[in-house]
Amino acid sequence: MRGDPGEREWAVEVDRLVKRYPKAPVDSVAGITFRVPPGEVFGFLGPNGAGKTTTIGVLTTRIKPTGGRANVAGVDVAGDPVGARRLLGVVPQQNNLDRSLSVRQNLLFHASYHGVPGPERKRRADKLLEQFGLADRPNGRPDDFSGGQIQRMMIARSLMHEPRVLFLDEPSTGLDPAARLFLWECVARLREEGTTVVITTHDMDEAATLSDRVAIIDHGTLLALDAPSTLVRGMAGERVLDCTVEPSPRADGAAMCAALGQLEPVDRVEPVEDPETPGWRFRISVQGEAAPLIGEVATVISTAGGRLTDVRLGEPTLEDLFIQLTGRSLR
Amino acid sequence: MTVPTDLETGSPPAVARPEARWGPWQTGAAILRRDLYVTGREFPLFLAQVILQPLFLLFVFGKVLTQLGYARPGYTAVLFPGLVALAAVLTGLQSTALPLVIEFSYSNEIEDRLLAPLPTGAVAIEKVVFSAMRGVVAAGVMFPIGVWLLGSIPWSSGAAAGVVVMTVLGALIGAAMGLVLGTYVAPNRINVTFALVLTPLLFTGSSQYPWPSLAHIRWFQVVCACNPMTYVSEGLRGLMSPGVPHIHLWICFVVAGASLVALCVIGMVGFLRRAVG
């Protein structure tokens, strides 16, 4: 965290923000409060449907809040959306580039909407195209580029009017590893230059790597907010056994979970909902060393009608914290 | 791949940025410039797209049927003003409706405009203004085409100003209809809606017949009276072919103006509902 801005205003200030969509039974955002000082990279971590995108929607003036207050660079986004739009930049989840225009024209017209004068517009566009590795095909149409290149175009476009706060909504979804790395380097660079970045993600590594502070959000509520290292420090001394189990037809997941919990040094056993893993997944938190326990764990699982197919040892990560807070995997 | 270096993203503190004096009007104008630029680049294609239908209508009904003796020679005095109205209204409608549906649901292209520093409703107004410009151009090209196809077009001296105003009104009405369609119709229903809306609109807008002459098909006359295009057709007919029976000009202007306001209000409500969550 870069600290209290003092006399200067907060880059983002959210106070008891509530959003309930018409006809929805529950609030999408249920009264969250946080502040982001200028120059910080602030990560919003949560599963799909947690309320991240809705919060970003409110902050970027695209969604009207039901209650509470939200300011961006000192401007009330609900009260003065036009004023707020001058100061913020948005990189959305989905490609929304202008397909009728070339890459360079996308940048130029965006700047013209924001009143950047002609010569300055061209100067900024050429510079950003160069910096984002797009200078070799400035006249290509967005449809002819890869997902990673489109992502870069959208970031370059959002920087054309030099926003004070940049919102990146799930920026690395669908990117290949190289493109993702490039994106991370871009965000790091922006941070060095003092742009405030608010980034939503359901990727643990991304949140931990990029953010000065991370807010964990689920069901529209803020569950934890701190620097990634501080968040994990709360779980000091713990080790984690991440087990994948192939269940037999007669196996009972709850019973297996309970039996594992009976083992002496085990603190918690969290079943993880993980659609990407075939079979069942448990994360077993242990005080002290975890490796000696693997044999016993395998025996318990086998007795309960399953077969241990994969096990990984590790320190607690943001993912463990997340699972501890919500009982769910992020994926 | 190169890593971005030296991004100057901080704002210069001392000197007021030129953007600070930039108002919503300028942003609206910039968005309009973008639309004009894209249309201008494909102008011949745009023309082909908008004039083909009225061109064929004019050719078949105005020339072929007249020459074959199925229509009386004076029919062009009825038909031509009606087709000018048709071109204005339909082009206006088509320029708004389909692009809006696509931009809101598939391409999301509209987002960059909705995030520009101007009131959200102004984005809708720009769409209507731009589509109306296309409608006016489509109506305008009907005149040289009419002269070329028919040899002469109905005209009455002193009608020019009225014709211009009524054509602009017609194009705006069409664009506002498109705003309503484009914001209320679900994307997966747009095809069927277009089929269900366009054909009736085309044939109940009094563009191929004078409305007063429908007196002996009363029910159809009532139906046509509900189509705002009727007042544009009748108004243009009253201005260009005053000898043909027509609805009083003042009624045409008043009803067309009122329809425009009503459609804009309904369309704006729909637009804001789609644009702001």
Image (cartoon, grey):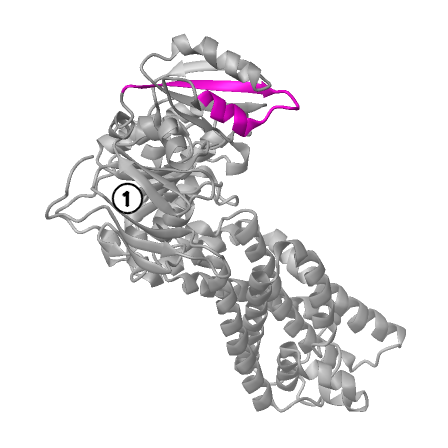
Q: Kindly identify the residue that appears in the image at 15 percent across and 48 percent down.
A: B15
Residue B225 rendering spot, x and y as whole percentages? 68, 84
Is residue A64 on the magenta stretch? no
Q: Amino acid at mark 1?
A: Val
Q: Which residue is mark 1?
A: A165
* On screen, residue B263 above or below B234: above
Which residue is more in the foreground, B163 or A138? A138
Specify whether residue B190 is in view.
Answer: yes
The reply, left or right, for residue B83 in relation to residue A282 is right
What is the span of residues highlighted in magenta in the rendered image? A237-260
Secondary structure found at label 1: strand
Which residue is more in the foreground, B190 or A246? A246
Residue A330 rendering spot, x and y as whole percentages? 45, 33
Specify whether residue A141 is in view.
Answer: no
The single residue placed furthest to the left in the displayed view is: A7
* On screen, residue A273 above or below B194: above
Q: Quadrant of the N terminus of chain B?
A: top left
Residue A178 rendering spot, x and y as whole percentages? 43, 21
* Residue A269 quadrant: top left
* Residue B229 quadrant: bottom right
Which residue is more in the foreground, B185 or B217? B185
Q: Quadrant of the C terminus of chain B?
A: bottom left
Residue B251 rendering spot, x and y as whole percentages? 59, 89
The reply, left or right, for residue B108 in relation to residue A230 is right
Q: Kindly identify the residue that appears in the image at 74 percent across and 73 percent down.
A: B203
* Residue A290 quadrant: top left
